[in-house]
Image: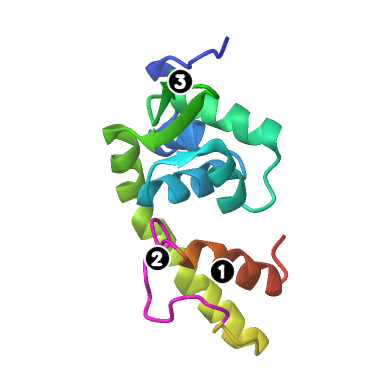
Amino acid sequence: MRIVRRPGAFVCGIDAAMDVIGGKWKVLILWALNERTCRFGELRRAVTGVTEKVLSSHLKELEDDGIVHREVYAEVPPRVEYSLTPLGLSLNAALEPLGLWGREHIYRGAEEAGVGVDAGVDAGGGVGVGAGADCAAEPQVVAGLGRG
């Protein structure tokens, strides 16, 4: 069972938010779910590099935190879909400025390194969270800049 920290245990609001979105994959899961409801396999493909074990663990934590809704359909074979709750949508809205900052940082780093930034990434300054097909292209650009 997951232990949820008491409100008084946080140093500040950033600390509380990082408790929810901390980890390499949670923000990318939120990103993928921002556009539409997804099944587990769809999320696994959308979040390139995540293992099934970690994805399952992160989804459970996000569900426990009230960010993700898990819907199980009584079908054979069983079908499970994940979507964002209103709290999850508000978290994505809060992450939007961070996505903009990251995009600007990537472009600046690419220009300094002399690397092209046209690998399918929206050059118009689109927002990182909920950018749809843009999501799949951005990790390659980041990896191309030497960030792992």
* Residue at disc 2, secondary structure: helix
Which residue, given by chain and number where applicable, does mark 3 sit on? Answer: 64
Q: Position of residue 125 (x, y in %)?
A: 38, 75
Q: Is residue 141 magenta?
A: no
Q: Nearer the viewer, mark 1 or mark 3?
A: 1
Percent of width and height locating residue 97: 35, 59
How far apart are labels 3 and 2 at the CA level?
28 Å
From what the image shows, is residue 15 above or below residue 71? below
* Badge nearest the viewer, 1 or 2: 1
The disc, 3 or 2, on the residue closer to the chain's N-terminal end is: 3
| Residue 88 percent coordinates (x, y) | 35, 37
In the image shown, does 144 or 41 lie closer to the viewer? 41
| Residue designated by label 1 | 137
Q: What's the magenta region?
A: 119-132
Mark 2 is on which residue type? Leu
In the rendered image, the quadrant that contains the N terminus is top right
Q: Which residue is mark 2?
A: 100
Quarter of the image where the C terminus is located: bottom right
State whether residue 37 appears in this view: yes
Amino acid type assigned to the residue bearing label 3 in the image: Asp
Task: Report helix, strand or loop for mark 1.
Answer: helix
Residue shown at the point (42%, 22%) measured from the top left? 73
Which residue lies at the image location 42% right of the left edge and 39% below the top edge?
Answer: 14
Task: Specify the farthest residue to the front.
Answer: 76
**Labels 1 and 2: the sequence-earlier one:** 2
How far apart are the two marked residues, 1 and 3, measured between alpha carbons? 30 Å
Mark number, residue 4: none
**Front-most of 107 and 127?**
127
